Image (cartoon, grey):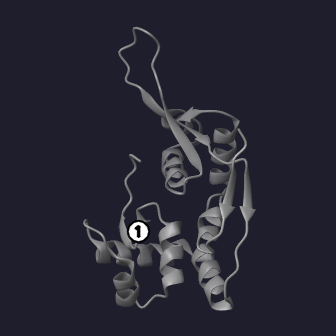
Amino acid sequence: MNRIKVVNDPSELVSTFRAVDTELKREIFKEVSAGWKTSQEVEDKFGKEGPVVLRLFNKMKLVETRWQQPPEGSQQKPVKAYHTYYSAFHINTSCSVFEISDVIAAAGMPDKEFKKLEDKILKSIGKEGKFAGDVAEELKLTQTMLKSLVKRSAKFDYRGHRIELHDDEE
């Protein structure tokens, strides 16, 4: 089935841009576009970073998952397999120059600088999560910048108006 991802929120562009910003991510995206692949299959082909990329794609909701059953009579447990969810993107958004500058800055931010901000957000939300407005105020970030940084990170996500740790088991 052909599914189209509709991007209405400018901050969603960050995950779209970052999903294929390295050769490794592009190759893994192509691999899971061609068919269902397990984390182990991706790791065997692409190395230890492969499963990390799959988790990022899962958090961005770019892949779907299903449990693959082992061969009959096998002692192995079922394993999660991944496949791309969308075959196309439709980008339909408008925003102010200030908002798009935050989105582009978050998407293009050097990894070292992003990691510092990601760590500050993690420290701020703790294990229980925190209202996004309070995090933005505490870190002196605009709502758009904060939302864009959250979209870029594989470690946390929005739940309503709160930022909480990302749960890989969704």
> Relative to residue 146, is residue 127 depicted above or below?
above
The residue tagged 1 is: 160
Q: Amino acid at mark 1?
A: Gly
Residue 161 percent coordinates (x, y)? 40, 73
> Relative to residue 68, is residue 73 depicted above or below?
above
Local packing at callout 1 (Cα closer than 10 Å; few below 14, some 14-19, many 20+) is few
Q: Residue at x 42, y 77 (%)?
A: 116
Q: Quadrant of residue 105?
A: bottom right
Q: Quadrant of the N terminus?
A: top right
Tag count in the figure?
A: 1
Residue 78 percent coordinates (x, y)? 41, 26
Q: Nearer the viewer, residue 142 or 28?
A: 142
Q: Residue at x 60, y 33 (%)?
A: 36
Question: In the image, 53: left or right of 29?
Answer: left
Residue 3 percent coordinates (x, y)? 69, 47
Residue 130 percent coordinates (x, y)? 31, 74
Q: Quadrant of residue 155?
A: bottom left
User: What is the secondary structure assignment of the residue under circle 1?
Assistant: loop
Whether residue 32 is visible to the viewer of this picture, yes or no, is yes
Question: In the image, 162: left or right of 99?
Answer: left
Q: Nearer the viewer, residue 94 or 74?
A: 94
Q: Nearer the viewer, residue 158 or 101?
A: 158
Q: Residue at x 39, y 8 (%)?
A: 73
